[in-house]
Image (cartoon, helix red, strand yellow):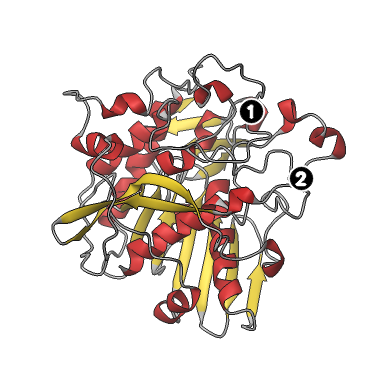
Amino acid sequence: MTSLQSPSSSFLHLALPSAILSLCFLSQWRISSPAIILSLKNHHRSHSYSSAPLFESNGSTCQLFTGTWVRDDSYPMYQYSDCPFIEPEFNCQLYGRPDSGYLRYRWKPQNCDLPRFNGREFLEKMKGKSVMFVGDSLGKDQWESLICLLVSSVPSASTQMTRGLPLSTFKILDYGLTVSFYKAPYLVDIDAVQGKKVLKLDDLTNNAAMWKAMDVLSFNTGHWWAHQGSEQGWDLIESGGTYYQDMDRLVAMERALRTWANWADSIADRSRTQLFFLAISPTHYNPSDWSAGPTAVTTKNCYGETAPISGMMYPGAYPQQMRVLDEVLRGMKSPPYLLDITLLSALRKDCHPSVYSGELSPDQRATPDRSADCSHWCVPGLPDTWNQLLYAAMFY
């Protein structure tokens, strides 16, 4: 069985010129001229794919996903107590996280300032419309963050939450806005065949039926392709009419993504629906990825991390899943807008739930080396920035 092992090449190495690297990778990881604050009002949205979408102003470019984290005491944009919809797995402050400094950072792109999320503006512009996040629990993380950003801006608004599997739906009734999460970790369908769960790499008919008539669709996938044994969501894989007990997981992911890409190119109503894709969300289980030099590593994961990595570069490995996603998106006729949050999220080793999750027992909280969650993100926290980037891409 082939597992998803990280390659030896790092984020830093991707800045080096190479014939096999794309221009977007080069522009994404390169350190450019000092940042200057520019208005985003002259930005004109484009459907052409870029792994680093740019805002343009006065002949200069804002590299939206390259920059630094800066301390800003006007953050967070809401408190956990303002949002009763945060589930225990993401609600770090409620479940005992002792520090709050990690909430007081703002993402500062090169050559511009990211527009601050304005919940009332979002609601006015999206009145009567629908937003759906499709994918795994990272999409759920972002979904709950968006709900909190919106609810905290209109605290007296009437709302309705319906949780279920695979579909959960939140409505802000005063604005007729529906914000949903549809659980589909692989995007493609999983069907029952003779008592077995079959992952169908060539078919997403059942899932896609639930995505119809949405005004905004944001997709993600990645982490579940590495799950094995009892944690994987299938018993068999079907591809090209053949059943497999297993296959190279990156190959399987690519085939599934191409099935999704064909749907997006030929079936999705792009005259109505804005498509987004959330890049691979990094994990922080190995402190050697961010600890450099002779200093001894004293932690075993993200537990105890309270501040971002400074600067614009991350020394750890670039996710292999992201290379697969990049290749598939480049081959599309009408690709989605890629929210390329991989690097900016990699710098936030401090934003995971760690042991401050309502899903852990007291015994688990006492053993962070074995139990810390360094995959998901606290809410409020980093997913609020993902939604700030989504907001900027939608409206600026």
In the rendered image, the residue lying farthest to the top is: 294
Number of marks: 2
Query: What quarter of the picture does the C terminus occupy?
Result: bottom left
In this view, which residue lies farthest toward the left? 59
Neighbour class for label 2 at 10 Å: few (<14), some, many (≥20)?
A: some
Left or right position of 348 against 337? right
- Quadrant for residue 390, please give it: bottom left
In primary-sequence order, the first of circles 1 and 2 is 1
Location of residue 357 in the rendering, given as x and y in whole percent from the top left corner: 73, 45
Instruction: Name the foreground residue: 320 vs 33.
Output: 33
Q: What type is the residue that disc 2 sits on?
A: Glu
x and y percentages locating residue 16 in the rendered image: 24, 25
* Residue depicted at x 22% and y 64%: 43
Q: Where is residue 4 drawn, in percent x and y?
A: 48, 23
- Quarter of the rendering containing residue 240: top left
Residue at the outermost right position = 362
**41 left or right, relative to 1:** left
Q: Residue at x 48, y 62 (%)?
A: 132
- Amino acid under label 1? Asn
Q: Which residue is mark 1?
A: 301
Q: Nearer the viewer, residue 107 or 382?
A: 107
Indicate whether 234 appears above or below 122: above
Give the label, 1 or 2, closer to the camera.
Answer: 1
Residue nearer the viewer, 50 or 205? 50
Q: Crowdedness of circle 1 by 10 Å Cα count: few (<14), some, many (20+)?
A: many
The x, y position of residue 32, in whole percent, is 24, 40
Q: Nearer the viewer, residue 177 or 285?
A: 285
* Local SS, label 1: loop
Q: Is there any visible trace of residue 395 in the rendered image? A: yes
Give the residue pinned by disc 2.
Answer: 359
- Up-down relation of residue 353 to residue 114 (above or below): above
